[in-house]
């Protein structure tokens, strides 16, 4: 599978998508974001190992850091009249199924976030635990009360994270609709 630079049309589709989704401000007419802000490569005939996606894929690396990487694919809409058809029965070239670019959002990313957050929460609690223990000792509070406070703080943090996840997923669902 060979990679190539994006065409002018693909660049325009990406920039239009980023502006529409609110990821970036509309560039000036003479501004070329692909000259130092966005680095992109397109793979024309990407195919997953199993049933899944086949088609163009654009990988974008932003100028901020190599970690700022995103993947975009071109989808075709499934129209209401297509919902009862098998994929092979849909006339994809009928002019009603024009491709559109879309950012790929990985559900697995939340698993990584969970792991990182768990470690950070534990590190934060560990850092403050000694100081909190000193305060509780000075105030003659029991260690059971301290343990309960730590447990409640951990639950509150996790609850906030779950709420943020739900809000993010809801926002992604609204964008897809």
Image: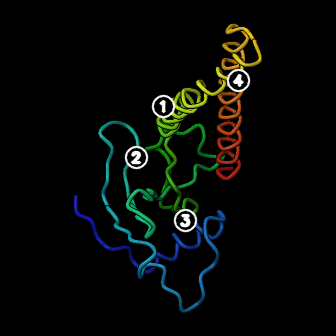
Which numbered disc flags the more N-terminal residue, 1 or 3? 3
Residue occupying the point 58% across, 67% down: 18
* Residue 61 x/y as whole percent: 40, 64
Instruction: Name the one closer to the observer, 79 or 60.
Output: 60
Residue sticking out furthest to the front: 138
Residue, disc 1? 115
Instruction: Name the one closer to the observer, 44 or 81.
Output: 44
Pointer 2 local density, CA inside 10 Å: few below 14, some 14–19, many at least 20: some
Which numbered disc flags the more N-terminal residue, 2 or 4? 2
Q: Which numbered marker is on residue 172? A: none
Pointer 1 local density, CA inside 10 Å: few below 14, some 14–19, many at least 20: few
Q: Which numbered marker is on residue 53? A: 2
* Residue 60 x/y as whole percent: 41, 64
The quarter holding residue 8 reads bottom left
Residue sticking out furthest to the bottom: 30
Residue, disc 3? 95
Residue occupying the point 55% across, 59% down: 97
Q: CA distance from mark 4 to mark 3?
A: 70 Å
Residue, disc 4? 135
The quarter holding residue 153 reads top right
* Residue 116 x/y as whole percent: 49, 36
Quadrant in the picture for the N terminus: bottom left
Q: CA distance from mark 1 to mark 3?
A: 45 Å
Helix or strand or loop: what does disc 3 sit on?
A: loop
Q: Nearer the viewer, mark 4 or mark 3?
A: 4
Q: CA distance from mark 2 to mark 1?
A: 28 Å
Q: Nearer the viewer, mark 1 or mark 3?
A: 1
Which numbered disc flags the more N-terminal residue, 4 or 3? 3
Residue occupying the point 45% across, 67% down: 64
Q: Nearer the viewer, mark 2 or mark 1?
A: 1
4 and 3 marks in contact (CB < 8 Å): no
């Amino acid at each position: 599978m060979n990679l190539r630079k994006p065409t002018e049309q693909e660049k325009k589709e990406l920039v239009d998508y980023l502006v529409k989704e609110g990821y970036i401000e509309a560039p000036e007419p003479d501004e070329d974001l692909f000259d130092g802000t966005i680095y992109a490569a397109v793979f024309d005939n990407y195919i997953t190992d199993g049933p899944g996606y086949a088609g163009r894929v654009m990988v974008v690396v932003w100028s901020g850091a190599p970690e700022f990487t995103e993947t975009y694919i071109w989808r075709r809409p499934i129209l209401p009249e297509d919902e009862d058809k098998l994929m092979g029965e849909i006339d994809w070239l009928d002019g009603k199924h024009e491709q559109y670019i879309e950012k790929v959002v990985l559900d697995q990313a939340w698993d990584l976030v969970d792991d990182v957050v768990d470690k950070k929460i534990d590190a934060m609690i560990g850092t403050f635990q000694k100081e909190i223990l000193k305060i509780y000792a000075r105030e003659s509070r029991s260690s059971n009360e301290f343990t309960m406070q730590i447990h409640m703080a951990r639950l509150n943090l996790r609850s906030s994270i779950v709420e943020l996840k739900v809000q993010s997923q809801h926002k992604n669902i609204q964008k897809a609709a």
